[in-house]
Amino acid sequence: MVKRCSLCGASAVTWIPESKQYLCAEHYLEYFERRVLKTIEKFRLLKNVKKLLIAVSGGKDSTVLLYVMHKFFSREINLVGFTIDLGIGKYSRESTEIAIRNYKKLGIEYIVVNLKRSYGFDIDDSVRFRKWIKRPPCSICGIVKRYLMNKVALEINADAIATGHNLDDLALFMMSALQGGKVEELTKLTLYNPSINGFVAKIKPLGLVSDKETLLYALISGLEFYEEECPYAPQRGLRTTIIKALDVAENNHPGFKRYFVLNMIRRVIPKLPKPQGRIMRCAICNMPASNNVCSFCKIRARINEVIQKYRNK
């Protein structure tokens, strides 16, 4: 039996458990956009933002973010796309190409940083020489992304950086931080992180829409995005267990993830002690750092040293 949209009677494309509604394609797009706009308004994510750097990997989340921000805010905010070619073989090459095609389609100014050309190493190098570097690629990738996003945002005088983290990402990060007792990490897991000590403000407009909701929006809208997962993403372990547990809770109690994340943001995180570490300037690049040399410069120096030493081994 064909399900009908609860609002107009057209053929439905999805069921929304929280509101107990079937929605057609047109009304689903409106529903999704309304959720994102409500998040932006309620948490004042764009207050005083005149120039916004949008981090785009080429995947579905950042691509949806790019299109939604362009649709509703391109007239009042200077939007600049930003993509890092991390040097992860086919994955980086194709996802970067897709990001560029979307920038051009929308007529958005964009910046692409090729990690290998600009800094002498890439993520594939960190995996190739992992025996000597002794640091997992995901850890290095995270440091690279945070560093370059902030560096570029400062260079172009952006007021904020927008990332495509969705509800599932935040729920996973929060549960992982709670399990590990990482209070300092929890304090960063909000929809809005203000500018402080040389770090540009960060916003997460998709923070209250789920992974499935974002995927459906991209498919209905006919957006081009890179569908493959990073080859270095962990496939097993605690992370996978937490994801499965959150999915079970959501299936049994629709809205669980959203309420969990909202309660953390509104009731728990504001009561946590803020990190008191002293912010310095990196002696090498002059970017903000917690030590004399920032994490990025340490990693860059170490990987380039190992590349030169063990290239032929």
Image (cartoon, helix red, strand yellow):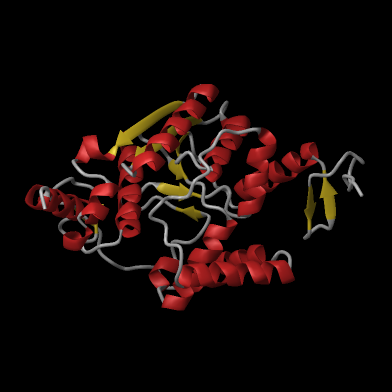
Numbered label tally: 0
- Asked if 12 appears above or below 79 in the picture, the reply is below
Residue in the picture at 29% in, 55% down? 140
> Which image quadrant is residue 121 in?
top left
> Could you tell me which residue is drawn at 48 percent across and 46 percent down?
163
Residue depicted at x 58% and y 32%? 73
Q: Nearer the viewer, residue 14 or 199?
A: 14
Residue 110 x %, y %: 41, 28
Inspect this view and state whether residue 211 appears. Answer: yes
Task: Name the side, left or right, on which 3 lies relative to 120.
Answer: right
Front-lying residue, 282 or 296 = 296
Pick the front one: 252 or 178? 252
- In the rendered image of this protein, does residue 173 appear above or below residue 304? below
Horizontal side, residue 227 vs residue 251: left or right: left
Place of residue 190 in the rendered image (x, y in percent of width and height, measured from the top left):
51, 59
Provide residue 219's location: percent of width, then percent of height: 66, 39
Query: Is any atom of residue 47 visible in this view?
Result: no
- Specify the farthest residue to the front: 313
Classify residue 133 as left or right of residue 166.
Answer: left
Q: Where is residue 270 in the image (x, y as percent from the top left)?
A: 51, 68
